[in-house]
Image: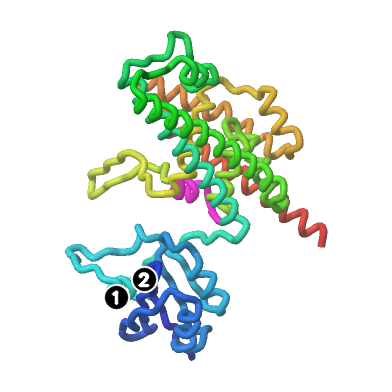
Amino acid sequence: MSKIRFVGLDVHAETIAVAVAESEGEVRSLGVIPNHEESIRRLVKKLGPVEQLRACYEAGPTGYVVYWQLTALSVKCEVVAPTLVPVKAGDRVKTDRRDAEKLARSYRSGDLTPVWVPDAAHEALRDLVRAREAAKQDHLRARNRLSKFLLRHGWRRPSGMKAWTKRHMRWIKGEVHFQQLAQEITLLDYVHEVDHAAARIERWEGAIDEVVKSAPAEMQAVIGALQALRGIAQLSAVTILSELGAISRFQAPRQLMGYSGLVASEHSSGERSWRGGITRTGNAHLRRVVIEAAWAYRHRPWVGGVLHRRQEKLSTEVKEIAWKAQPRLHARYRRLTARGKNKQQAITAIGRELVGFIWAVGIQVEAEKSKQKMCAI
């Protein structure tokens, strides 16, 4: 009977520390190799038959390149969550060698939690969505710099004028001036940065529209179905899909809630039980989109013109799920606020339940697509 060898890899930009744990034996370091495809190929050849190898490394800034290189060599590889790697209390020595050995040992004992590795289409879509999100953050910072600069010198927008509208920007460009040349140059640069960041966002959103139109039919179906939910338009739906991939990989809605980091933290011991705020240990991008969408459920249930148009071509089952969410979540919001919860706490609770409806919609659409494929065969 062949014995499995568990390989722990501590991956960095230029190097990879390697350790091996025998199925019933020692854990030993194999040193450090360059982070290059040829070096990985030689390592695999040195370790023996690929059927006996199980490799793992932590998710990080190096992405999934090593994963794809190992799987191309027929080595079973998993990328694990770094925050869930067991740590010994009192262990204050951290080196690449020890990290690789710890990964190999924990992988052998089954103490590591693998993360989802996106396929090429999902990874490309996620890169695009996150680039647009970065542009939004740059835009916000550019606005803040400009507004604080104007405030510092006593310039305040006229009463009745909303901030960052076209009218507000025309006022800044046409009415705000300084006597000092240096300050005038600073103003022009700050205004240019705001305009440049806004143009970047428009380009990214246009690119997302084009990518969605050319996406596989399965991805388009999920993106369209998620928009049946109130508060989730195309950008939010694309973000959810890019961060989750196949929603059916979550066996139950509670698993997806945990992945989003919207479940309550807990510390219980004996007869004492304490629940705190949300864990925030899941996917931050998903959590942000869901919380933004949850604010729509403050209002009474209603299917207006825009939402009605988004639902027109969807199945009856998806529309029923979307409608079920509206009275349920609105009623819960009213109950929580009536009990004295502040709006943010109530919206967080609504967001957690909204994740369950996202799961239900995704499961329904993926089941429909799977059935259509079976019928076509």
The local secondary structure at tag 1 comes to: helix
The one nearer the camera, 265 or 41, is 41
- Residue under numbered circle 2: 10
Residue 88 drawn in magenta: no
Q: Report whether 375 appears left or right of 27.
A: right
Disc 2 from disc 1: Cα separation:
8 Å
> Mark 2 vs mark 1: which is more N-terminal?
2
Q: In the rendered image, is residue 110 in sight?
A: no
Q: How many marks?
A: 2
Q: Quadrant of residue 264?
A: top left
* Label 2 environment density (alpha carbons within 10 Å; few <14, some 14–19, many ≥20): many
Per the rendering, the mark at residue 97 is: 1
Residue sitting at 36 percent across and 71 percent down?
A: 10
Is residue 96 in view?
Answer: yes
The residue range painted magenta reads 249-260
Q: Quadrant of residue 232?
A: top right
Residue at the location (42% across, 14% down)? Answer: 157
Q: Residue at x 48, y 91 (%)?
A: 1
- State whether residue 43 is above or below residue 57: below
x, y (%) of residue 296?
53, 27
**Residue 262: quarter of image:** top left
- Secondary structure of the magenta portion, mostly? helix
Residue drawn at point x = 48 percent, y = 22 percent: 164
> Callout 2, which amino acid?
Asp
Q: Nearer the viewer, residue 122 or 34?
A: 34
Say which amino acid is labelled 1.
Arg
Q: Looking at the image, is 284 positioned above or below residue 186?
A: below
In this picture, residue 312 sits left or right of residue 337: right
Percent across and percent down for residue 327 are: 57, 26
Which residue is the extreme one toward the right? 376
Query: Is there a contact, CB below 8 Å, between mark 2 and mark 1?
Result: yes
Indicate whether residue 250 is drawn in magenta.
Answer: yes
